[in-house]
Amino acid sequence: MTVQRSDVEDFLYREARLLDTARFEEWLDLFTDDALYWVPAGKDDIDPSRHVSIIHDDKAAMATRIKRLRSGFAFSQDPASRVHRLISNVEVTGPEEGSSIFEVNCMMLLVELARKRQTIHTARCEFTLDRSAAAWRIRRKKVNLLRNGEVLESTPFLI
Amino acid sequence: MQDVGSLIRNDSVHRSIYTDQHIFDMEMDLIFNKTWVFLAHACEIAEEGDYKTTYIGRHPIIVTRLAGGTVTALINRCRHRGPIVCQHEYGNSKHFRCPYHSWTYDNSGNLIGVPMPQGYGKSFDRTQLGLTRVPRVAEYQGFIFGCMTEFGPTLEEHLGGITKFLDAYVAVSPTGKIDLFEGTQKCGYNGNWKYQLENGVDPYHVGALHLSAVTPEAMEIYRQGRGSVVAMDGHGVTDHTDWGPMPVDASLSGGFNLVIFPNLIVLRSQIRTVRPIAVDRTEIYTNAVRLQNVAEDVNLRRMRDQEFEFGAAGTFFTDDLEIFERTQEGLQSGAVDWVVFARGLDREEMRNGYMTGSMSDETQHRGMYQNWKRMMTSVTSPALAAE
């Protein structure tokens, strides 16, 4: 299977746009049922069975997170954060012969505006993407925040 | 300056305790420089030479385990020109060297190396220039505290009735000892540190602020109104043990929350350390608690739930952080000076020697603020009294 890097970039831009425009249910649909959504704490490379993370969600936990954001009672998102994401430095590895799994690295610049305060995050993101079906699916999204070891302000939006 | 004691009434507190920088400065001196402050859990510095850096009020602190196993705490400040001598959160070292002029200390604080010492002349006495030691360090059930005064209540006297709750907390672990998972959740908010202390033992808010996050089963238990709140020796307790004991899975189904004045919160599968930065800035460091000799999936669930609910992106904690910042903004208004803590005043009663209120009452907050008032108005500190 061959894909152009621009195909992957288009997908990553779409993923970013779904989050920036609060289309969370469509975003969730991008993920496989066994997906992992992971934001490590402290440093990028930790063993999440021994070390705490900022977010370590399976798909059910992601759905619960979204349900909360939609509940009308998620006070930390009233009003909702406004978020802009810039995706860059996209590198695609794979797939292995006979596989449809791609490993993708990219950089993300995420700017959040909430409570009159602009917060800037940068992250090195890792995606495991599955192209076996007609559309791209995300099996793993890992966001390595530059500040993952620092004191963070409340981060109630989806990263 | 008005009398600080007058800022605490039985049914309310004055807003300036959250907004006045001078009050904050007094708190650093009369509370954090006087009483027992939580520093570390024993498992964070398990081996000889292990250290952790933390704070007592404004003092940067190194807590370290010495050869032989005893724990000492040192002010992390070179005695020469003042830089911190250790800039890492955790590590293992027998010595600390200030890179500025290479003054070097062993890990019990003794000054063991000064380049070109002859330049200081004959009167130079390096034994007087070791890292300043925190006068007292003590441990209870693995929780290590430091106290900046040499005299005064022991740690166990300070904890009072809380000791039996800490006994019960660690007894959930089959070995009677708890560990922490690696890593720390670090969050900050633009608000006063005492909001977090109030909030750590505040069942009243759970069904309101956390409506979007609390499960229907837990909400049902809260609505039943069982459980009690206790003003315990200056600390705060919410006691849910009539629902059930502290659950091994750390679910919202029983047990208790502890606010150990002035900087430690223990609840479910987490210990939270409160670090006051300024009158309107606070940092919270949270660690997930691991039990010994339980199935790995049970421990993993404890950590995953803690992350999901109480990290920087936590479904509970983000709403807490939000309300702390809104409170700081609202209390800028002096149109009304008093903040209400009157809930349950007409139904609380002495039980087992402690003032005890119903589930949603504010008895525990009143107890903490009476303790705050006592400390903030004590004319002679224990150290001065002993001199």
Image (cartoon, helix red, strand yellow):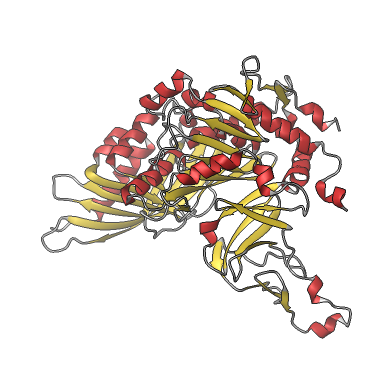
Image spot of residue A106 (x, y percent): 35, 56
Looking at the image, residue A134 sits to the left or right of residue A93; the answer is: left
Tell me the residue at 45%/43% (across/down): B269
Check the image and report above or below for B208 versus A97: above
Check the image and report above or below for B154 versus B209: below
Looking at the image, residue B123 sits to the left or right of residue B236; the answer is: right
Image spot of residue B145 (x, y percent): 64, 52
Q: Quadrant of residue B354?
A: top right
Looking at the image, residue A42 sits to the left or right of residue B67; the answer is: left
Residue in front for this viewpoint, A131 or A86:
A131
Check the image and report above or below for A121 versus B5: below
Tell me the residue at 46%/50% (across/down): B176
Check the image and report above or below for A16 versus A4: above
Image spot of residue B363 (x, y percent): 63, 25
Q: Residue furthest top?
A: B346
Residue in front for this viewpoint, A19 or A54:
A54
Tell me the residue at 38%/30% (across/down): A68
Image spot of residue B265 (x, y percent): 56, 41
Tell me the residue at 62%/15% (across/down): B347
Residue in front for this viewpoint, B9 or A62:
B9
Is residue A151 visible from the viewing direction of this image? yes
Is residue A4 visible from the viewing direction of this image? no
Q: Quadrant of residue A32?
A: top left
